[in-house]
Amino acid sequence: MVNEISYQSTPEKLIFDMHTGCLADDKSLALGYNKINVRRPIVSVGIIINGVPQIVPMILNKNGRWIGNL
C-alpha cells in the first residue's frame, strides 16, 4: 500500500490524485498476504483543505487502535 499525492496539469488547471489506505487491520486474515512485505501499511486519512490535499497518518496505540488524535 502506498500513500501518495501526485499532480498533473493541463493548460487550464492543476489536477491531483490521492491514494490513502483503507483503514483495514493489518493483522486481519483478509490482509494475510501482506505478512511477506517488508514495508508495513500506514493507517492514514486523506483530507483536502482549501483545495490542497494532505495525507495525515493516524496515531495508533500499542494495540493498533487509534488514539483519537491526528
Image: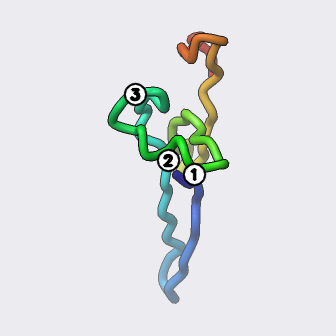
Which amino acid is tagged 2?
Thr
Residue that appears at 60% across and 27% down: 58
- Mark 3 highlights which residue? 28
Q: CA distance from mark 3 to mark 2?
A: 18 Å
Residue that appears at 49% across and 70% down: 15
Secondary element under disc 1, as helix, strand or loop, is loop
Q: x%, y% of residue 24? A: 41, 32
- Mark 1 highlights which residue? 3
Circle 2/circle 1 CB separation < 8 Å: yes
Mark 3 / mark 2, whichever is N-terminal: 2
Disc on res. 67: none
Q: Residue furthest left?
A: 30
Comparing 31 with 58, the one in front is: 31
- Mark 2 highlights which residue? 20
Mark 2 / mark 1, whichever is N-terminal: 1
Residue that appears at 57% across and 51% down: 3
Q: Quadrant of residue 66?
A: top right
Q: Please name the colour scheme applied to the rendered image.
A: rainbow
Q: CA distance from mark 2 to mark 1?
A: 5 Å
Q: x%, y% of residue 5? A: 58, 59
Which amino acid is tagged 3?
Ser
Q: Is residue 38 above or below residue 67?
A: below
Circle 3/circle 2 CB separation < 8 Å: no
Q: x%, y% of residue 37? A: 59, 50
Residue that appears at 57% across and 17% down: 64
Q: x%, y% of residue 22? A: 41, 39
